[in-house]
Amino acid sequence: MSTHTEPAVFHPQAARMNLPGIRKVTFDQPLHWLRDGARDMVKAWPLSLFYGIVFALLGYGLAHGAWGKPHLAMALTSGFLFVAPLLATVFYCVSHRLEHHHKLPNLWVPLISWRANPASLGLFALMLVFVLSVWERISAILVGLFLSGSGISSLADLLSISAVQQHTDFVLAYLAFGGVLALMVFSLSVVSLPMLLHRKVDFATALVTSFMATRLNFIVMLWWGVLIAGLIAVGMATDFIAMAVIFPWLGHASWHAYRELVERE
């Protein structure tokens, strides 16, 4: 006799919002999302690899284009985490099709998947642009406060071991501010973007659902966020070469996270 039990479903309440049920998941679930994401990536490898290479080149261009301006290079490199959920919509589209056993779309269809919910996705994009702008200003202020007159003129200077040891106060402050902002963006986007593509819901409903899912599964979602940040850090450490595989892998996995966390219609 099977001992498998379905995850508990909670139905959050919010004024004038019809929120879907949220599942309580276990600590090992993010590893299953990564496994399922890898499976989707293999099934759709031409599309996944193509868009993975495109986004890896985009990240490389942003990081190296501002290489001589430390605060801007750091803001754009770390800010890649903030805008990644929006870029990953192409992989949500592909995983959605695979889930329903549809044939893979042609190359350009995932790029126009935003047409499923254009107003709400547009608002989400504007929110991320605002967050990235705020982060760029915070980064500039931190560099001005802690590194003024330090002689650091490029990101390479700052990433050296001696510079990190010498400017530990800056590193800790940067991680603290960046971590708080990243946690906020993560909690609001972890299921909202796939939800906006998949269901006819408004911007606010998607954000609140994502926040509730994170709040209900806080430790698990923190673990999921650490896995995402760690894998993206590996991609960046390889000069964005590994990002061509890591980014689509995480994009497909994030679709499965949404499908597991939010009760199905």
Image (tube, rainbow, N blue to C red):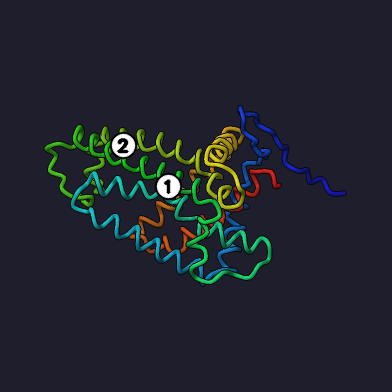
Nearest to the observer: residue 76 or residue 232? 76
Please, what is the three-letter code of the amino acid marked with disc 2?
Answer: Tyr
**Residue 84, image x, y percentages:** 43, 51
Determine which quarter of the picture holds residue 149: top left
**Dot 1 amino acid type:** Ala
Residue 219 in view of the camera: no
Residue in front for this viewpoint, 97 or 213? 97
Would residue 157 appear left or right of 234 to someone viewing this image? left
Image mark for residue 228: none
Q: Residue 159: x and y, percent?
A: 26, 48
Q: Total number of numbered labels?
A: 2
The residue tagged with tag 1: helix, strand or loop?
helix
Instruction: Residue 88: give x, y in percent of width and height.
Output: 48, 55
Asked which secondary structure carries label 2, the reply is: helix
- Select label 2 or label 1 by which is in front: 1
Q: Which residue is mark 2?
A: 174
Q: Residue furthest right?
A: 1
